[in-house]
Image (spheres, helix red, strand yellow):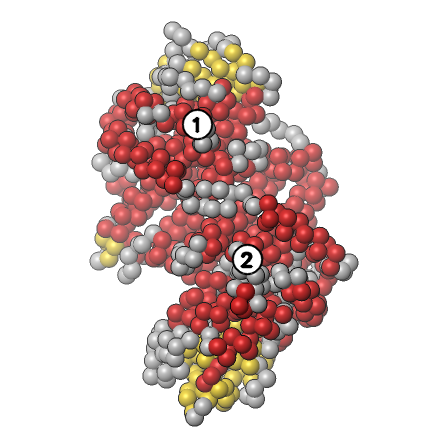
Amino acid sequence: MDLDWNDDQRAILDALRVLLDQHAGQERAAELARDDAYDTALHAALADAGYLEISLADDAGLLEAAMLVDAVAGAAGSVSIGASALIAPALVGAVPPDPVALARAGERGPVRFGAHAAQVLVDDGDEARLVELGDRRGEPVETNYALPMGRLPDPLPAGRSLGAGSSARLRRLWRLALAAECHGAMRAAMDLTARYVSERRQFGRAIGSFQAIQHRFAECEVRVQGGRWLMLEAAHQGAPAGAVELAAGYATRTALQVFNELHQFTGAMGFTREHPLHTWTLRLQLLRLELGGPGMHYRQAARVRWGRAARGGTR
Amino acid sequence: MDFDWSDDDLAFRAELRAFVAANLPEDWAKISSEGPGGADLVAFSQGFCEKLAERGWLTQHWPAEFGGRDASAWRHQILGEEMWGNAEPRGPRYMTVNWVGPSIMHFGTEEQKALHLPRIARGDVVWCQGFSEPGAGSDLAALRTSAIRDGDDYVVNGSKIWTSYVNHADYCYLVARTDPDSRGRQGISAILLPMDLPGIELREIPGLLGKKYFHEVFLRDVRVPIACRLGPEHDGWGVVTYTLAYERVGAAHYDRAARVLDAIAAEAGRKGLLESDAILERLGEARAAIEVARLLTYRVIDLREKQSPPTPDTNLARVAGTWAVRMTGDLLLEVFGAEGLVYGSEADAYFRLSQWAGVASGTTEIQLNLIAGHQLRLPRE
């Protein structure tokens, strides 16, 4: 047991922060969100520096990949970091060069990066499939939720099966990446808002000095930090069934609470584009829906733990 | 970062589990149904703790010079999980080894160490904690119990309330105001009070949580030698703070909650309730809350093992632990139904005791205040 980053992990994080300071951040995210654009430059910078391959290195794995996804989300990156750096490498053993979308067979709603992806990882019941879109790219949809979304071609090309049972692994990795991405965005939004309520004054005092705000903020802090440990332990253990569903369930349920509370604390200002809170919070509304949302994550966690007695439902 | 237990730790846990299985009697559920302070459990805990001490497990995390084995904080946490997870067969003595001993090691004189630590390490002494007063609950610094110097003694007057285990205690870890002109955190001292001194009276307070659970202690002209003071005179707030950092995560409530949640799922299965999406979701959510409490507690243990001073992680862990217990207790009653309201039934004891998780050992609101101030650094008024 050692719950601090080791020297190697700290060195990776330090170097990564330098890159993210240069290529990502709130202003960059706001600029991209205006046009529902994908951050091709950030994607390339992460790829060139070798970060997308982090989980394939001899001395690293899913924990380092989760750390990366968390950090990129914290810097408000508009890239398919979870799919590109955590899910695809672990599932197919290689890093796709272009943006990757995630989809579930039979669901036709818009998905993250649906109009920018060259490849799609599809959860198709028992098996996962890797679909090359070639010239048949998705159609963008206009969205308010920070990350670009699009509708994938319908029907999707069949693509390549990743083997019997591979979809379960895809869902586990997807849930881990979701938890990491939620955490990064929530942490940044919490830090921003802690500063805001310390400076914003009403009734002659900083609003963050009111207990009505302090207790609710502290409750969010317990959940954000608790969810971080769930996510990191699940990553360290290789994304096992049970742990990842708990991590995703806790992260996505916390995401809604954090969204609601931080926007409440920030008042009308938080609903403007001039205040940066939206950079991190709007994407939480998108992330919390994936793979069925917190209720589905929790039900699946219960089925994993209590096995035969709890059979029924799906995924 | 590494979440794996060492092979030695895994072997220790396995050995400990076998020991517990072999040493808990058949009527253990009944013995433990009144919590760690129940009379039957207190009586049982003496022999049980002596066996733990014989194996060197009771205070293994203490330094060898005080009867320990210099074992890691992690090793003591494994003991705590296997004990609390089994309804705490150490009874009130868990508290004694968790924080009374370490506090005496940190602040005590050589005489105090020589007197108290060997007894605690043998498991043959019970302590209680004399902190709360009728006018000083969450606001502990408002305490009024006085200890005024008179020759070689302090003369103690006042009262303490909600004093768990006091009806079985040999000693009380008392905080009192030694400077009568002081207010707030100034002028307080910690005193290691023998409970057999003249002038100490107990009153049982009928409570909702079980039989003989709450007590009030009256102290009338109790003469206690000045040599019983722990740490600096008038400057005991630091002693209290140090103590509370250990106390707040001293009991591995999450481990018991995890075992109870498994029992809830089994009962739900027998009743066909696992077909219900709502029950499944709540089981999953409770499981997540328990795992969060475990991991936030592990962070505290990790920092303790690294000799870090106390951090707000302790408060985070405490709040998460309370949520986990409450969520588990609430679900327990819903799944077991009215049978859980029958005193002494399978579901009764845990639900009964779970209800005050947010009050015992410091309210959730105080933990949230501390998180807001020390972790989030939100401004004071």
Number of dots carrying numbers:
2
Q: Quadrant of residue B233?
A: bottom left
| B340 sits left or right of B297 in the view | right
Q: Identify the image quadrant of the C terminus of chain B.
A: bottom left
Which class describes the residues within 10 Å of circle 2: few (<14), some (14-19), or many (20+)?
Answer: some
**Marks 1 and 2, Cα distance to the nearest angstrom?**
35 Å
Q: Is mark 2 on a helix, strand or loop?
A: loop
Q: Name the residue under label 2.
A: B71
Name the image quarter holding residue B143.
bottom left
- In what element is the residue under mark 1? loop
Q: Quadrant of residue A257?
A: top left
Q: Nearer the viewer, residue B356 or A264?
A: B356
Instruction: Report whether mark 1 lies on the same chain as mark 2.
Output: no
Residue depicted at 40% across the width and 82% down the height: B178
Q: Which chain carries label 1?
A: A
Question: In percent of the image, x 54 and y 65: which residue is there?
Answer: B64
Name the mark on residue A57: 1
Q: Name the chain under label 2.
A: B
Which corner quadrant holds the N terminus of chain B? top left
